[in-house]
Image (cartoon, helix red, strand yellow):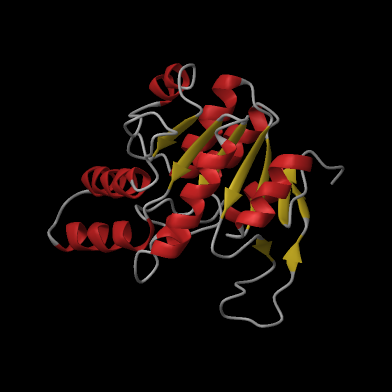
Amino acid sequence: MAVISLGGSIVCGDNIDFNYIFSFRKFLEEQSKNDKIFLVVGGGKIARDYISMASKLGMNEFLQDRIGIMASRINASLFLGNYSYPKVADNVEEAVIASGSYPVVLMGGTEPGHTTDAVSLLIAERIGERRVINMTSVGGVYDKDPRKYKDAKIIRRMSYRKAQEMFLSRDMDAGLNLPFDLVSIKIAERSKIEICIMGKSIEDLKKAMLNGECKGTIIGITND
């Protein structure tokens, strides 16, 4: 069993990444023969573009979130196949029920105020899974933005408390682009779910699923 949150920026950066989606679909098809996978897909740049337009049109945060949710579900639909539940699940309960009959279940956003990362944590909490794999374009948590600073250092392991402190001052605006969010960390902490934040490599994903190897940052229980 695996719960995976796939960052929308991986799927849809400046353009939709056909080659990556094609390869990931092949991975899902192969894994579906022996495993169950919940895959939650983010909205990426296309969602942020729509949210920005909605804001300019005067729509409130609630409606902006709804638009972002629709974009994430469109992204998730690109991973539907004969190996999966035939539609993007609307909520966690539908996803859990569908997993009883299908090895792969796709999800996007569910409700305003919850990121797709939070959705993946809620799924894990619901089914009793103790680990979520969070695939991002950044590949981990750094001491500063690695896209701006070449000397940024990755943090290999951090506690829920440290993760919350790092993001406590951040606003949860619609379309906020962060490796994870405060709501997700709180869900993980209350159910002691470990989060592996890693990059986009499908080979690294296989290793994470097979033996728990995390080539990025692990957020969980520590002594700090």
The correct choice, above or below, for 132 with respect to 218 in the image is: above
Where's the N terminus, which quadrant? top right
Q: State whether residue 116 appears in this view.
A: yes
State how many labels appear. 0
Which residue appears farthest toward the bottom when viewing the image? 150
Relative side of 224 to 151, left or right: right
The correct choice, above or below, for 53 with respect to 111 in the image is: below
Q: Nearer the viewer, residue 196 or 32?
A: 32
The picture places residue 134, in percent across and down from the top left corner, at: 59, 48
Q: Residue at x 61, y 60 (%)?
A: 201
The picture places residue 163, in percent across and down from the top left corner, at: 66, 50
Relative side of 132 to 50, left or right: right
The correct choice, above or below, for 86 with respect to 149 in the image is: above
Relative side of 94 to 39, left or right: left
Q: Residue at x 51, y 27 (%)?
A: 103
The picture places residue 176, in percent across and down from the top left corner, at: 42, 57
